[in-house]
Image: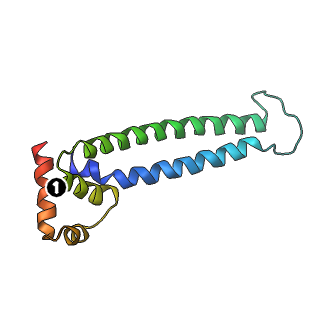
Amino acid sequence: MTYNELDRYRQLVNRIYYIEVELRELAELSAVRLDGMPHSRTPGDPVYQAFIKAEKLRQKLEFQKRQAVDELQKLNDFIESIADEELKNIFKARFVKGDSYEKISEQLNCDRRTVSRKIKKYLNYF
């Protein structure tokens, strides 16, 4: 696992959130009839075309969400596999919560560089 991979944690959480918002909006749009009249399911029907486009977008978003969730799970598994509790808490604070080195060092009552070195040392070891 690299620092850059771990640093994507919060980006993935946000990406999953926005994909879920888009999926909910698509579901709401799909539930609404444009004019209340029955429509055919022929390829030339504009409502049918809109439905097909929305369905393709939904499938694409679902795929992207699955990929993001899988990547997020790998990051969680990596962090949870850290045996040293202090180090695990440092990783959670830095990558999951997004705390700065300064904030983490204040909580641990140590120097900012100590926190940085612990992260780098652990990542270089694995």
Relative vertical location of residue 71 with respect to residue 88 in this rendering, above or below:
above
Residue appearing at x 71%, y 37% in the figure: 51
Relative vertical location of residue 93 with respect to residue 83 in this rendering, above or below:
below
Query: Image quarter for residue 87?
Result: bottom left
Residue appearing at x 34%, y 60% in the figure: 97
Residue appearing at x 27%, y 48% in the figure: 5
Task: Where is residue 56? Give x, y as percent.
Answer: 60, 35
Q: Is residue 79 left or right of residue 24?
A: left
Colour scheme of the picture: rainbow
The quarter of the rendered structure image containing the N terminus is top left
The quarter of the rendered structure image containing the C terminus is top left
Relative vertical location of residue 114 with respect to residue 13 in this rendering, above or below:
below
Q: Is residue 3 left or right of residue 41?
A: left
Q: Residue furthest top?
A: 42
Query: Image quarter for residue 91?
Result: bottom left
Task: Where is residue 35? Give x, y as percent.
Answer: 86, 45
Q: Residue furthest right?
A: 37
Give the total of numbered labels: 1
Task: Where is residue 11? Give x, y as percent.
Answer: 39, 54
Q: Which residue is mark 1?
A: 119
